[in-house]
Every structure is written in C-alpha cells, then in structure tokens.
C-alpha cells in the first residue's frame, strides 16, 4: 500500500471535539470507508497525522504533538 492509500483515512476525519471534563483532550471523529486503515497504524503515527491536519486547517504551526493517543 502506498503512502497516499495509507493516508486516505484523513479525508474522512469529520472533526475534533473538545472534552470539557478532560483538560487537554481532543476527540477525533473518522467514519469513512477508509477508517479501517487507522486500526493498522501505530498510535504515534495517528497523533502525527492528526496534528498535521489540525496545523494545516488552523494555520497554526505551534500545535504540539499529543502526549498520548487512545483509540
């Protein structure tokens, strides 16, 4: 599988929600047909790609990488 196929799941990320009860926690939503690809990825890869996506759409290069990724 090439890199573009591996990153296809990012097209189906529908958003991120702040969890008010849990400081510093974002909940990401991915529900497309390529969402199964996330199951094959390491947590640090998921965090890296989600951070890059957030940086791109917010135009904020200072968004840090997550400390933990939980699925």
Image (cartoon, helix red, strand yellow):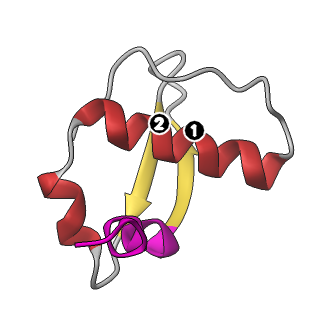
Label 1 secondary element: helix
Q: Main secondary structure of the magenta part?
A: helix
- Location of the C terminus by quadrant is top left
- Residue at 34% of width from left, 20% of height from top? 68
What stretch of residues is rendered in magenta? 1-13
- 24 or 43: which is nearer to us? 43
Residue 48: mark in rendering: 2
Question: Considering only vertical position in the picture, is 22 above or below 32?
Answer: above
Report the residue at 41% width, 14% height from top: 67
Marks 1/2 in contact by CB < 8 Å: the verdict is yes
Q: Residue at x 52, y 15 (%)?
A: 23
- Picture quarter with the N terminus: bottom left
Q: Which quadrant holds residue 33?
A: bottom left
Percent x, y of residue 4: 43, 72
Q: Return the residue nearer the eye: 6 or 22.
A: 6
Could you tell me residue 37's position as x and y percent? 21, 66
Relative to 38, is 25 on the left or the right?
Answer: right
Asked if residue 19 is positioned above or below residue 15 in the image, the reply reads above
Left/right placement of residue 57 relative to residue 46 reads right
Residue 43 vs 33, above or below: the answer is: above
Return the residue at label 1: 51
Of all residues shown, which one is farthest toward the left? 40
Q: Secondary structure at mark 2?
A: helix
């Amino acid at each position: 599988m090439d890199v573009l196929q591996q990153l296809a799941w990012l097209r189906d990320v529908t958003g991120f929600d702040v969890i008010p009860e849990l400081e510093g926690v974002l909940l990401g939503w991915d529900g497309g047909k390529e969402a199964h690809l996330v199951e094959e990825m390491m947590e640090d890869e998921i965090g890296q790609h989600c951070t890059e996506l957030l940086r791109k759409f917010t135009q904020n290069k200072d968004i840090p990488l997550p400390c933990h990724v939980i699925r």
